[in-house]
Image: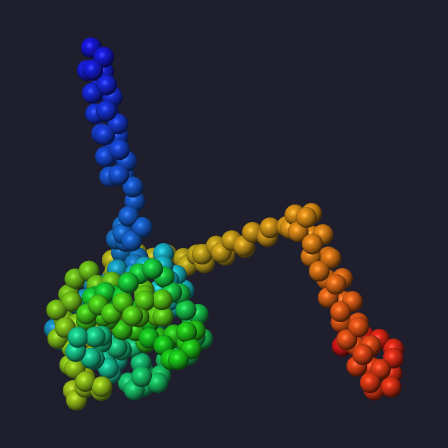
Amino acid sequence: MRSKFVIAAMAGLLFSGTAFAQAAPDPYAPPPVSPQNILNLDLSTGGRVKIQLRPDKAPYSVERIKTLVRRHFYDGLIFHRVIEGFMAQGGDPKGTGEGGSDLPDLKGEFSDLPHVRGVMAMGRAQSPDSANSQFFIMLQPNLGLDGNYTAVGRVLSGMEYVDALEKGEPPANPSKIVHMSIQSDDDGQPPAAFVPPPPAPAAAVVAPTKKEARKAAKEAKKALRAGQRTDAAVNAVSGDESVATPQ
């Protein structure tokens, strides 16, 4: 009877542990797909690319894209830099890689999202806080970009139309963005209001212990006496024996 109870208890623990492991959230799993965060990218290569935007990782950059999409800013722009096996870059009204919108540049929102195939990220200049309107879509993984560029989403479907973009820097006959839209707008839903994320919590300030405070005060006095002796010696050489106050 006792052995049966032990076996039953062990089975219960195993089952509960399995259930807990199944219930544990995946920190890299995207949130549920919402029409408010689906970007539709219609390309001249013949089809629609659907991208899940990630405001949970880059709220201000995602909001910038939505703002420009609703202005029809991207419609008709070319992919001016498409490198085989690397990425495809667009979103520049000049078509040269040197342009942007009339809105201010964005601060970098670097996250734990890896730059794998299909990831969409913000293009920028040398400064990490210089992203504006340009973006790129990864054709192949390049984890060396992680922590240096703001990833804003990932392709859900239609990657074949990204693969078909004309290659070159710049391409001889560049492919174009025919139209960009947000799925919820296409469905007739009102845009969701942008809610800025809460500020990061301030680092906790740890007060020194009494022992540490006494030690620090003693070391400060010692340093001050040493400094005064040095100043007196310097002033004596110059003919002034008074202790100068450090400036």
Q: Residue at x 87, y 79 (%)?
A: 241
Tell me if residue 230 comes above or below residue 51 in the rendering.
below
| Nearer to us in this view, 8 or 85 | 8
Residue 43 image offset from top left, x and y in percent: 18, 73
Q: Residue at x 29, y 41 (%)?
A: 24
Q: Residue at x 19, y 85 (%)?
A: 168
Residue 14 appears in which quarter of the rendering?
top left
Q: Residue at x 19, y 60 (%)?
A: 156
Q: Is residue 169 visible?
A: yes
Residue 226 image offset from top left, x and y in percent: 76, 69
Residue 182 image offset from top left, x and y in percent: 28, 63
| The furthest residue to the top | 1
Tell me if residue 119 comes above or below residue 175 in the rendering.
above
Please identify the quadrant where the N terminus is shown.
Answer: top left
Residue 173 image offset from top left, x and y in percent: 16, 87
Left or right of 90, for residue 216 = right
| Nearer to us in this view, 139 or 183 | 139
